Amino acid sequence: MHFLYLFLALASPQAPTPSTPPPVTIDARNMPLTDFLTTMGTMANVNVLLHPGIQGNITLAVRDANWDALLDLVLKNYGLGREMQSNVMRIAPLVVFEQGYKQQAAVEAARQIVAPLETRVYTFIYVKAADMAPVFSKFLSPRGVVIVEPSRNMLIIRDVADAPA
């Protein structure tokens, strides 16, 4: 019976827990930056995806340095950034990340423009709907509209389907 429990524990899909990399001790002169970054990934047991524009050499001498702090300092020194997805660390120039975020924002804005509108009705008992309209307005997309129906103390909100209001 114990074997069955062990088997289920091993077979269940779980995300690997990231381990804390040991302190780093490196003495390198004119080491290619790409080699340094892949070595750092190996130390942390993560896969590394490097942007093709990464180039240059690094010279450093560190003893018992924190892995995260050392990597962040080197990346900052070379104008690079990193992002983690699962167990893959992507390293690229900061400009590449900035362009990617701008493209994602543009795609989201375009999606909001063509997304279908949804109507929601909120009825209030202990507060006036007119007092709540400014609060709800803060959470609407640019296409959102709040209509106050004072005779029934209701708010009628028309907005993009996934807006929070």
Image: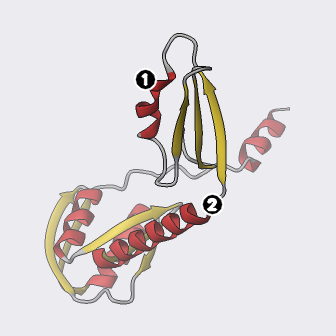
Left or right: residue 72 versus residue 18 is: left
Query: Three-letter amino acid code at disc 2?
Result: Ala
Left or right: residue 122 versus residue 30 is: right
Provide residue 157's location: percent of width, then percent of height.
58, 39
Which residue matches tag 2?
115
Provide residue 93's location: percent of width, then percent of height.
30, 78
Any mark on residue 131, and which? 1
Provide residue 33's location: percent of width, then percent of height.
27, 83
Provide residue 78's location: percent of width, then percent of height.
20, 77
Q: Which quadrant of the view contains residue 67?
A: bottom left
Between label 1 and label 2, give the one nearer the viewer: 1
Q: Earlier in the sequence, mark 1 or mark 2?
A: 2
Position of 115 relative to 57 (above/below) = above
Position of 163 relative to 134 (above/below) = below
Q: Secondary structure under badge 2?
A: loop
Query: Three-letter amino acid code at disc 1?
Result: Asp
Position of 73 relative to 157 (above/below) = below
